[in-house]
């Protein structure tokens, strides 16, 4: 029998990094200004460092495992939404689902992820803006 121990989730580095990024997201949500941009860059750099760390912690180069990891998508989502705050985080959850389904060959999962992501993209970029009230 092997003596494997599992660390509770709240004692893991990824958990506390996500908490720090969440707190940073509160500051990024403030009105436009130099402070918002500065916080966005700081937390993008932090998320980028932890995305690279997530990749380097594996002993072998396995891009599929890295792309299917939810922590990777949380960090990538943080990077992009901190720089471009108009993008909702939910989009990256769906993109992560699509990536996991594609890696696993689950075509039904790919379709479900696409049907979830397409309305977000449509509403962001293609939906006509309402005419101003007269």
Image (cartoon, rainbow, N blue to C red):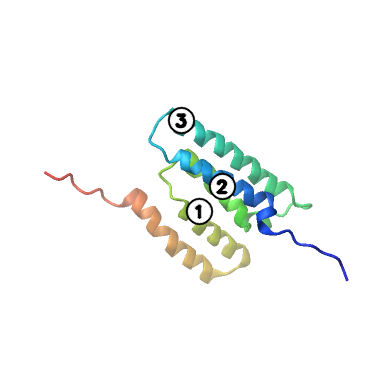
**Residue 63 in the image: x percent, y percent?**
68, 53
Which mark is in front, 3 or 1?
3
Q: Quadrant of the C terminus?
A: top left
Q: Is residue 62 left or right of residue 116?
A: right
Q: Earlier in the sequence, mark 1 or mark 2?
A: 2
Residue that label 2 marks: 76
| Front residue of this view, candidates 43 and 61 | 43
Q: Which mark is residue 92?
A: 1
Q: Mark 1 touching mark 2, by CB under 8 A? A: yes
Identify the element where label 1 is drawn.
helix
**Residue 7 in the image: x percent, y percent?**
73, 58
> How many other residues sit within 10 Å of disc 2, few (<14), some (14-19) or many (≥20)?
many
At 87% across and 67% down in the image, what residue appears? 2
**Residue 85 in the image: x percent, y percent?**
43, 42
Identify the element where label 2 is drawn.
helix
Q: Which mark is residue 35?
A: 3
Which mark is in front, 3 or 2?
3
Specify whether residue 25 is in view. Answer: yes
């Amino acid at each position: 029998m092997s003596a494997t121990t599992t660390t509770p989730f709240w004692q893991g580095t990824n958990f506390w990094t996500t908490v720090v990024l969440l707190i940073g997201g509160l500051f990024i949500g403030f009105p436009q200004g130099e402070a918002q941009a500065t916080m966005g860059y700081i937390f993008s750099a932090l998320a980028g460092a932890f995305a690279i760390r997530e990749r380097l912690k594996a002993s072998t180069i396995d891009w599929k495992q890295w792309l299917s990891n939810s922590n990777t998508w949380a960090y990538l989502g943080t990077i992009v939404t901190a720089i471009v705050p108009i993008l909702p985080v939910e989009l990256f959850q769906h993109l992560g689902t699509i990536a996991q389904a594609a890696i696993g060959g689950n075509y039904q999962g790919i379709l479900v992820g696409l049907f979830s992501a397409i309305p977000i993209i449509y509403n962001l970029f293609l939906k006509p803006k309402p005419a101003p009230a007269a």
